[in-house]
Image (tube, helix red, strand yellow):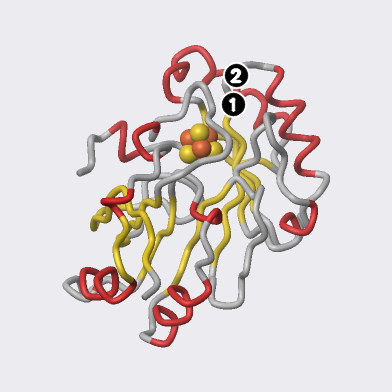
């Protein structure tokens, strides 16, 4: 029986990126190979045996809701082989979004939208850039703009949206700088974490 370590799963509103404002069912996987200082989901890093949930239970939980958008996030969900889970969800008519750092191979056959958020500590696999629908760079300081540009070179800009997202704990300082940067470099868009700003449960 295939099972996965799930930190939490819940029905809410996508708060950031291209699909912000969209109702979605979130599945947050445990485990992360990066461990960013400013991570806002540190509680998902640890993989706990007791949190492994069989696929059929995950599907049953989702089926309690009418929403057809699934956001698979973490932690780092691509640490796990999601092929069977995404295949079953897809056959049931769900639209599958994945949020990843891009450091593991992405089996995208049953995925509809892939958000890659590269981290300097460990860069995405080269093969993953071309699968990226949305490149999301977290901006904590002005050096991160250079990193954003270095990462944008790798993606196909014709079918990949480019986002800069203020690092939450440094929002007040960095937000005006991101606005100025985007005005000068309009290929970028801003991604705001409205679920945090508006405390959306
Ligand atoms: Fe947190 Fe994501 Fe960084 Fe992992 S890659 S530490 S989940 S922000």
- Residue 141 vs residue 44, the one in the foreground: 44
> For mark 2, what is the residue?
177
Residue 152, numbered circle: none
Q: Pick the quarter of the image with the N terminus.
A: bottom left
Q: Position of residue 63 (x, y in %)?
A: 22, 76
Circle 1 SS class: strand
- Residue 136 vs residue 72, the one in the foreground: 72
Residue 114's quadrant in the figure? Answer: bottom right
Residue 191 in view: no
Q: Position of residue 192 (x, y in %)?
A: 44, 36
In this rendering, is residue 124 above or below 199? Answer: below
In this rendering, is residue 180 above or below 13? Answer: above
> For mark 1, what is the residue?
139
Residue 144's quadrant in the figure? Answer: top right
- Residue 183 horizontal side relative to residue 86, left or right: right
Q: Point out the frontmost of discs 1 and 2.
A: 1
> Measuring 34% from the left and 72% from the top, which residue is drawn there?
55
Which label's residue is closer to the chain start, 1 or 2? 1
Q: Are marks 1 and 2 in contact (CB under 8 Å)?
A: yes
């Amino acid at each position: 029986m295939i099972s996965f370590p799930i930190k939490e799963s819940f029905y809410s509103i996508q708060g950031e990126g291209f699909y912000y404002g969209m109702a979605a069912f979130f599945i947050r996987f445990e485990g992360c190979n990066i461990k960013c200082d400013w991570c806002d989901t540190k509680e998902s890093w640890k993989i706990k045996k007791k949190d492994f949930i069989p696929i059929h239970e995950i599907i049953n939980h989702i089926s309690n809701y009418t929403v057809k958008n699934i956001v698979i996030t973490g932690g780092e969900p691509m640490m796990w082989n999601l092929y069977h889970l995404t295949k079953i969800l897809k056959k049931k008519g769900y639209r599958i979004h994945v949020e990843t750092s891009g450091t593991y191979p992405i089996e995208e056959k049953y995925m509809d939208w892939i958000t890659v958020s590269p981290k300097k500590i460990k860069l995405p696999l080269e093969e993953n850039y071309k699968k990226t629908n949305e490149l999301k760079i977290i901006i904590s300081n002005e050096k991160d703009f250079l990193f954003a540009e270095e990462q944008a070179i790798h993606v196909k800009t014709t079918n990949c949206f480019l986002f800069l997202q203020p690092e939450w704990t440094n929002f007040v300082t960095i937000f005006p700088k991101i606005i100025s940067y985007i005005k000068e470099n309009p290929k970028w868009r801003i991604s705001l974490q409205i679920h945090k700003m508006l405390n959306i449960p």
